[in-house]
Amino acid sequence: MTLEAIRYSKGKLSILDQLLLPTQTQYINVNNTNDGWQAIKKMQVRGAPAIAIVGCLSLAVEMLKTDITSSEELGNFICERLDYLVTARPTAVNMGSSAKHFKQRVTTLLKDRDLKVEDFKMIIVEEIEKMLESDRSDNVALAKYGAGDIMERCTHNKARVLTHCNTGSLATAGYGTALGVIRALHEDGNLDHAYCTETRPYNQGARLTAYELVYEKIPATLICDSMAAMLMERKKISAVVVGADRVVANGDTANKIGTYQLAINAKYHNVLFYVACPTTSYDASKSTGADIIIEERPAEELTKIQNIPIAAPGINCWNPAFDVTPAELITGGIITEHGVFKPSELKHKLKPFITKGGL
Ligand code: RI2
């Protein structure tokens, strides 16, 4: 059985509270978009694809409870709730793209004067529900491409891979992106060892990725973020594979803080550096990483762990949650469900798969 971050059956949504992992496994109900917004903001659910899926499913759950009788009113309600959900966290593109896509669907469906309000509602709800399965199958396809490329290009018989943050079943609808690549290498008997960083300040690596690796019985070792250069120098790492919160047109990539320094380290040590990016995490509307808004989170995430103070009281803190890795450092390539591409070819290669609505 694989880990399930998101549980959904028609009109019922619950999520694994990721703030309590790894010590407690507790699901919480998400009954409406207010609950969805809170869960995303507090990071009870996190990871770029999972944020959009839970946000949209929270809307589906709420829609199924509404008794709005006019299509115009329902359309306004959907659009207003989508705009609200986008405000929870700014850096990952996925919720924003989903909102754009479903708002465009609302506009299109409202043009059909014969469409009954109940049918309008069910079309949107069912399209949202499909996000779960398509995210999972995209991740499986992406992981196979990534594992294949690493084995073709690495000089070792089996790969030793370093990853950062959490990009597994807990960050997605299932299988994972960068962690999916590690999973695929392992399933094919091609993984020598996986290394995961702690991922300070919020420890998604130590709490979540390490949990998934142990759960899946994948041979793995945890390191502090500050050990990455030493690891690359001493442990014959074949590749670094990380996820993405937003990859823009030129290939610049926003991902968890600390990704940029891993890419610099990888370049220095001649280690292939890959970004796993399902098309839903690609943003063609922004040209370079300078256009990406970087979320800054509360100082307490640095100064406390599980509410226990670990820093000198009164010290100033800066807590950007993400950094931008320049495309030129992505030496392995950008792994998508359609293949592995150089950052410079991404725009052209993904063009056929991007619809106007953003998904
Ligand atoms: P995929 C996470 O951010 C990390 O940046 C991680 O790389 C990404 O989301 C996972 O999403 P946070 O939400 O890479 O934990 O799987 O702040 O797309």
Image (tube, rainbow, N blue to C red):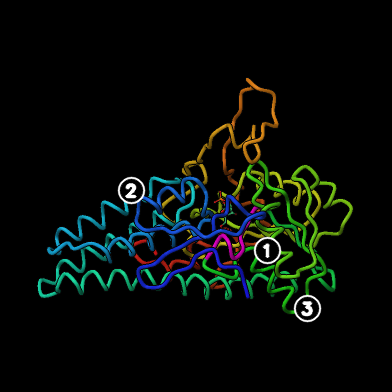
Residue 189: image location, x then y, percent: 78, 78
For image coordinates 20% across by 74% down, the residue present is: 119
Read off the magenta span: 165-172
Residue sitting farthest toward the left: 113
Tell me which amino acid carries mark 3: Gly
Q: Nearer the viewer, mark 2 or mark 1?
A: 1
Where is ligand 1, by quadrant? Answer: bottom right
Q: Quadrant of the N terminus?
A: bottom right
Q: Quadrant of the C terminus?
A: bottom left
Mark 2 and mark 1: span between their CA atoms? 31 Å
Tell me which amino acid carries mark 1: Glu
Q: Secondary structure at mark 3?
A: loop
The residue where tag 1 is placed is 212
- Vertical order, 273 against 133 (above or below): above
Q: Based on the displayed image, in which of its 4 quarters is residue 202 positioned?
A: top right
The residue where tag 2 is placed is 84
- Vertical order, 232 against 295 (above or below): below
Q: Residues within 10 Å of mark 1 (few under 14, many from 20)?
A: many
Q: Based on the displayed image, in which of its 4 quarters is residue 116 positioned?
A: bottom left
Name the disc covering residue 189, or none.
3
Q: Nearer the viewer, mark 1 or mark 3?
A: 1
Residue 27: image location, x then y, percent: 52, 60
Q: Is residue 190 magenta?
A: no
Q: Secondary structure at mark 2?
A: helix
The reply to whether the C-beta atoms of the residues labelled 1 and 3 are less than 8 Å apart is no
